[in-house]
Image (tube, grey):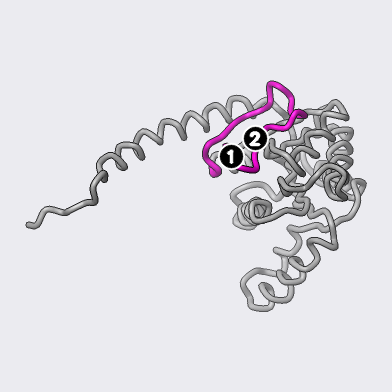
Amino acid sequence: MRKEQHPKGWNEIKTNDSWAIFKIMGEFVNGFERMSAIGPCVSIFGSARTKPGEKYYELAVTVAEAIANAGYGVITGGGPGIMEAGNKGANKAGGTSVGLNIDLPFEQHDNPFIDPDKSLDFDYFFVRKVMFVKYSQGFVVMPGGFGTLDELFEAMTLIQTHKIGRFPIILVGKEFWGGLVDWIRNTMLEAGNISPEDLDLLHVVETKEEVVDIIDGFYKGHTMSPNF
């Protein structure tokens, strides 16, 4: 039988992949241990490129502040832009402010509004995403790019397939999100690729009051309580 030939360095690649398992395991263990005690939280997603003073940055600050004032913790990706705004609002209200930072070459760096003992760093996107969905009881999605869409559809898929609880997913900014929601309704639904009830997973709002009302409405129907 002919011996299988592999490219030069193949064994080294396999060895590195095997050792990576332990690093991945370490990130999961550290994340589970540190996140398990934070209490009910809401994740805020959005663009890292949004600047202070811009409409959606300032709206994200007020939304996060209102969420924290209502007794819920706030989890963000820990970086600049909307993530910074979310942590800033939670910090301003004296609430729990968590940052799940990812090691990236350009956009990402820790923002200064995360609680010192609630800043976690990750090398692997998939480990970080597990922390978002495992320890969040709601998802507030501000305008963003590909990463924000990835987080949005990850949450929707997990809820749709009953892998996590049916927590509220709130899109903030009708002008920004309206076209996507219309496409989901008029194209995906019409093609039979989703069910009509899947549209109920999404709430599109404009104000911080609407965000808190939706989250409070969810909590009133469940046994979990906010962080009072």
Q: Where is residue 202 in the image (x, y as percent from the top left)?
A: 76, 58
Residue 139 located within the stretch drawn in magenta: no
Element type at marker 2?
A: strand
Q: In which quarter of the image is residue 2?
A: bottom left
Name above or below for residue 193 compared with residue 102: below
Q: Position of residue 75 (x, y in %)?
A: 72, 36
Mark 1 or 2 closer to N-term? Answer: 2
Residue 121 located within the stretch drawn in magenta: yes
The residue beneath circle 1 is 128
| Residue 6 relative to residue 197: left or right | left
Label 1 sits on what residue type?
A: Arg
Name above or below for residue 208 compared with residue 91: below
Q: Where is residue 91 in the image (x, y as percent from the top left)?
A: 82, 29
| Magenta span main SS | loop
Name above or below for residue 103 compared with residue 161: above
Residue 100: which numbered mark, if any?
2
| Front in this rendered view, residue 29 or 111 | 111
- Callout 1: few (<14), some (14-19), or many (20+) C-alpha neighbours within 10 Å? many
| Front in this rendered view, residue 157 or 57 | 57
Q: What stretch is highlighted in magenta?
A: 103-126
Q: How many labels does the image show?
A: 2
| Residue 59 relative to residue 109: left or right | right
